[in-house]
Amino acid sequence: MVLAPSASTLSGELGAEVPDSGAGTYLISYWGEKPTGGYSLGVESASLRGGRVTVRLALEEPPPDAILTQALTYPYVVAVVRDVDPRGKEFVFVDHQGRELGWPVRRVEA
């Protein structure tokens, strides 16, 4: 996970253009290398309670009997948590069942 206070800061970190959607925390989440196609990653929701932001991710795996592209893939998602300044906040990422993923979070400052 990479967190940034603006689209331009995240764009500079990634070396790719991230569209500006207004004030908030911009993030990118990587699911790592997967052996085939059929994997997807999305942001379902984000909630702020006190100084803790919980981001719920949708992690989709292909069905066991699916016919898939036989190539390495790298699922990721870019999102913005609108109107939330990342400074002084703890960000926690959970799956659709609310289990903490424990993925490392790196912050990029402006």
Image: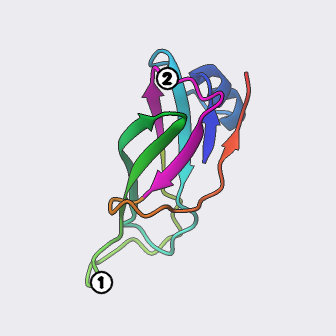
- Where residue 1 sits in the image (x, y, percent)? 60, 48
Q: Is residue 13 magenta?
A: no
Question: What residue is disc 1 on?
Answer: 64
Q: Count the marks: how many?
A: 2
Q: Residues within 10 Å of mark 2 (few under 14, many from 20)?
A: some
Question: What residue is disc 2 on?
Answer: 19
Q: Which of the 4 quarters of the picture holds residue 99?
A: bottom left
- Tell me: 50 left or right of 10: left
* Labels 2 and 1: the sequence-earlier one: 2
Q: Which of the 4 quarters of the picture holds residue 39?
A: bottom left
- The residue shown at (39%, 50%) is 56
User: What numbered label is drawn on residue 46?
Assistant: none
Q: Residue furthest front?
A: 50
- The residue shown at (27%, 77%) is 63
Q: Nearer the viewer, residue 69 or 54?
A: 54
Label 1 near label 2: C-beta < 8 Å?
A: no
- The residue shown at (33%, 63%) is 97
Amino acid at pointer 1: Pro
- Tell me: 69 left or right of 53: left
Q: Residues within 10 Å of mark 1 (few under 14, many from 20)?
A: few
Q: Nearer the viewer, residue 67 or 87?
A: 87
Q: Nearer the viewer, residue 25 or 14?
A: 25
* Region of the chain picked out in magenta, as a range: 78-94
- The residue shown at (66%, 37%) is 14
